[in-house]
């Protein structure tokens, strides 16, 4: 028989209250249990001393004979200093999936193309205005000669 240390729910609707119990792992959540080891009241403040109550020597006994705590109970036992729980870190948890990465790469590529097109348009707009005086200075012979107007005598 595999034995588990887990929470058994009690309390009213939207007012949970849990017993920390030792039970057969195949029995229902709120069903028959072997022994009650403490209580957990999540409604109370986190720093309240009555939030979690445990009978430490019985918890240590059941852990010694092979009872496996659930994740939540293991967290409570770790906070109480009875049993350290293994660190379960997942470094890839926040990493986006393949399709999201592809969308992000496509978006970045489109933004880069837009930036390049904008820079090219700005450079093209500045280039003709800079080239116009330079062309006139290079080819002075192509300019039309100025015709001096002949003075006509004024009739009076």
Image (spheres, rainbow, N blue to C red):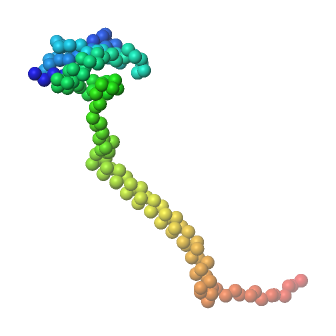
Residue at far left of view: 1
Q: How many numbered badges does the structure rendering display?
A: 0
Picture residue at 34% right of the left edge, 54% below the top: 106
- Measured as percent of width and height from the top left, residue 118 is found at 48, 61
Picture residue at 33% right of the left edge, 26% below the top: 81
- Measured as percent of width and height from the top left, residue 10 is found at 27, 12
Q: Quadrant of residue 90?
A: top left
Q: Quadrant of residue 79?
A: top left
Picture residue at 30% right of the left edge, 25% below the top: 82
Q: Is residue 19 above or below residue 123?
A: above
Instruction: Return the residue nearer the eye: 15 or 129.
Output: 15
Q: Is residue 150 above or below residue 131?
A: below
Q: Is residue 115 left or right of residue 78?
A: right
Q: Is residue 112 left or right of residue 146?
A: left
- Residue 18 seen in render: no
Quadrant where the C terminus is found in the figure: bottom right
Instruction: Return the residue nearer the eye: 113 or 85.
Output: 85
- Measured as percent of width and height from the top left, residue 111 is found at 41, 55
Instruction: Return the residue nearer the eye: 75 or 119.
Output: 75
Q: Is residue 29 above or below residue 138?
A: above
Residue at far right of view: 156
Picture residue at 71% right of the left edge, 87% below the top: 147
- Measured as percent of width and height from the top left, residue 88 is found at 28, 37
Q: Quadrant of residue 132?
A: bottom right
Q: Is residue 72 left or right of residue 51?
A: left
Quadrant where the N terminus is found in the figure: top left
């Amino acid at each position: 028989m595999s034995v588990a240390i887990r929470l058994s729910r009690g309390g009213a609707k939207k007012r949970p209250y849990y017993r920390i119990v030792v039970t057969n792992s195949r029995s229902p959540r709120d069903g028959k249990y072997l022994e009650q080891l403490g209580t957990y009241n999540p409604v109370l403040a986190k720093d309240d001393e009555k939030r979690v109550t445990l009978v430490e020597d019985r918890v240590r006994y059941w852990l010694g004979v092979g009872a496996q705590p659930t994740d939540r109970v293991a967290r409570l036992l770790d906070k109480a200093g009875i049993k350290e729980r293994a660190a379960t870190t997942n470094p890839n948890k926040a990493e986006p999936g393949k399709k999201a990465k592809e969308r992000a790469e496509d978006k970045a590529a489109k933004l880069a193309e837009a930036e390049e097109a904008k820079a090219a348009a700005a450079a093209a707009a500045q280039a003709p205005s800079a080239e116009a005086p330079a062309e006139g200075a290079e080819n002075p012979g192509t300019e039309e000669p100025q015709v001096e107007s002949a003075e006509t005598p004024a009739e009076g």
